[in-house]
Amino acid sequence: MNKQTGTAEIADSDKADDPLGKRLRARRRELSLTLKDVADGAGLSVGFISQVERGLTVPSLSSLASIAGVLRSHVTNFLAQPEGSSAYTRHDERPVYAVDKAALSYERLSTTFPDSVLNSVIVHEPPGYRSEPIQHVGEEMFFVLQGAITIEVENETTVLEAGDSIHFASTRRHSSWNHTTEPVTILHVCTMDVFGDNPRQDQEPGNRAGHPAANNEP
């Protein structure tokens, strides 16, 4: 247990080698939570949580952070991420990482400092990839750097091409789909603590910036 945050730590190195879904399921059962408990708290569907636990699908970084928050853990307990140790990043020096190599990959842009709010990554989305519908606290913005993507926010669908952007409250259920046959590259900025850097004492781990809690009912 992390004494400063009151969140669980994965102390057993053997457990850290287990598949992601197995570790998430073990933590859920440790807390005596149902699939519905996790789904409702994370703003996701029961079916999606079940598929993640069985290794049938891979969560996005935002979804993993939401699930980790419900499990009273930091996202870093389930995914090793680059540290935002500098205010500057160089285009040829940023490590590319992923929850799973077959899904989205990321490059971290933002750093962290006392009371920092914004978190930012460059997202590389393969052709045909569909993200899971989700809602959570905070706000976010997508700016398409290359390619085209379909964004759906509460049943309102918009196609964004290179140079286009969208900014919305994350409490609105949203998802994305690379409807093309080419990879798409997106600048993603959000207020959710997707890196697990600065969890606030008065909020669930994974949520920050003082935004009101989301209505997570489907």
Image (cartoon, rainbow, N blue to C red):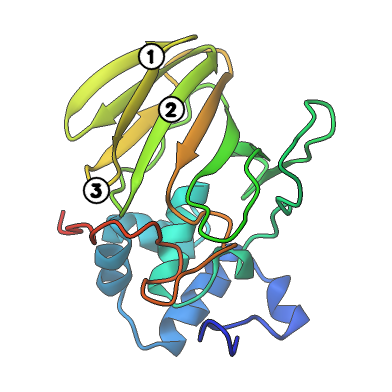
Measured Cα–Cα span from mark 2 to mark 1 = 9 Å
Q: Amino acid at mark 1?
A: Leu
Q: Tell me the quarter of the picture where residue 105 sits.
A: top right
Give coordinates of residue 209: x percent, y percent. Answer: 39, 56
Picture residue at 47% right of the left edge, 22% below the top: 143
Of marks 3 and 1, which one's residue comes earlier in the chain?
Answer: 1
Give the answer, above or below, for where 53 lies relative to 126: below
| Nearer to me, 56 or 21 | 21
| Nearest-to-viewer mark from 3 and 1 | 3
Picture residue at 40% right of the left edge, 61% below the top: 207
The residue under label 2 is 142
Q: Secondary structure at mark 3?
A: loop
Dot 3: few (<14), some (14–19), or many (≥20) neighbours within 10 Å? many
Seen in the image, is 149 located left or right of residue 98? left
Residue 111 visible from this viewpoint: yes
Measured Cα–Cα span from mark 2 to mark 3 = 15 Å
Dot 1: few (<14), some (14–19), or many (≥20) neighbours within 10 Å? some
Where residue 171 is drawn, which disc sits there? 3
Disc 3 and disc 1 in contact, CB within 8 angstroms? no
Q: Residue furthest front?
A: 114
The residue under label 1 is 160
Give coordinates of residue 130: x percent, y percent. Answer: 41, 33
Of marks 2 and 3, which one's residue comes earlier in the chain?
Answer: 2
Disc 2 and disc 1 in contact, CB within 8 angstroms? yes
Seen in the image, is 116 located left or right of residue 191? right
Seen in the image, is 34 located left or right of residue 29? left
